[in-house]
Image (cartoon, rainbow, N blue to C red):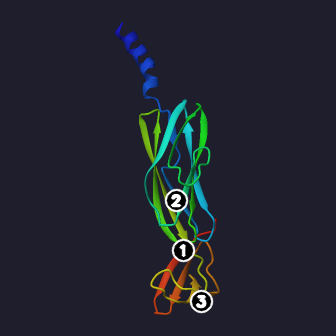
Amino acid sequence: MNKIFIFFFIIFTQHLFSQTHAIEELVVNLSGNASVSDFSNYTYYHAYDSCDVSWTIINDSIPNGWLFSVCFPVCYSPGITSANQVFPSNSEQLLNCHIYPNNIPGSGVIYMEITTNGVQKDTVEWSATAINDLTLNEDSEIDNRKIINIYNLEGRKLSKAITNQVILIEFDDGLIEKRLILNKL
């Protein structure tokens, strides 16, 4: 009799402890050029069961002048920091963040709390970096130093920085810095 009771107890309580959802990436990196209108990156929210989902931006530390918007699964205007929706079972929802750098280089982080069925909480971290293009005769973002030369790692002189490559930058004060220039989005 105890074995039958335990069997039915396991069957009936299994649903209480089953996983209702998953988020592919909880830390999402975004990068782009500060001169573009926006750049973005995404992950996915997988609903294994029907889920009542709400989200809110719980903290952000982005440069003054930047804006951001969220798509989950519909795209919201900049300034909207919370919403809710019901997702059907066995569905995949796009979870996206757009950064509008407004020609301001810098980096920042946005924390988004997602609550599923009023109980389960996940935090997605959006880590964003906006850079300036580097060319000769341009001032550096640091200490207003003048760029004298740009080199690749083989020591060849470049007329401008090449995206997705590590470069060496020689400044007018004699210092040389190593930087990675990311692909424009």
Say what amino acid the circle numbered 1 marks: Leu
Instruction: Say which label, 2 or 1, has the lower sequence index.
Output: 2
User: Percent x, y for residue 85?
Assistant: 55, 36
Q: Secondary structure at mark 2?
A: strand
- Residue beneath the point at 53% across and 72% down: 105
* Position above or below: 86 against 30: above
Q: Residues within 10 Å of mark 2 (few under 14, many from 20)?
A: some
Quarter of the image for residue 90 reads top right
- Residue beneath the point at 51% across and 66% down: 65
* Position above or below: 179 against 147: above
| Left or right position of 28 against 184 | left
Q: Which residue position is annotated with label 3?
A: 137
Say what amino acid the circle numbered 2 marks: Asn
Q: Which residue position is annotated with label 2?
A: 29
Q: Which mark is residue 180?
A: 1
- Of residues 179 and 116, the one nearer the viewer is 116
- Tell me the quadrant of the picture where the C terminus can be found: bottom right
Say what amino acid the circle numbered 3 marks: Asn
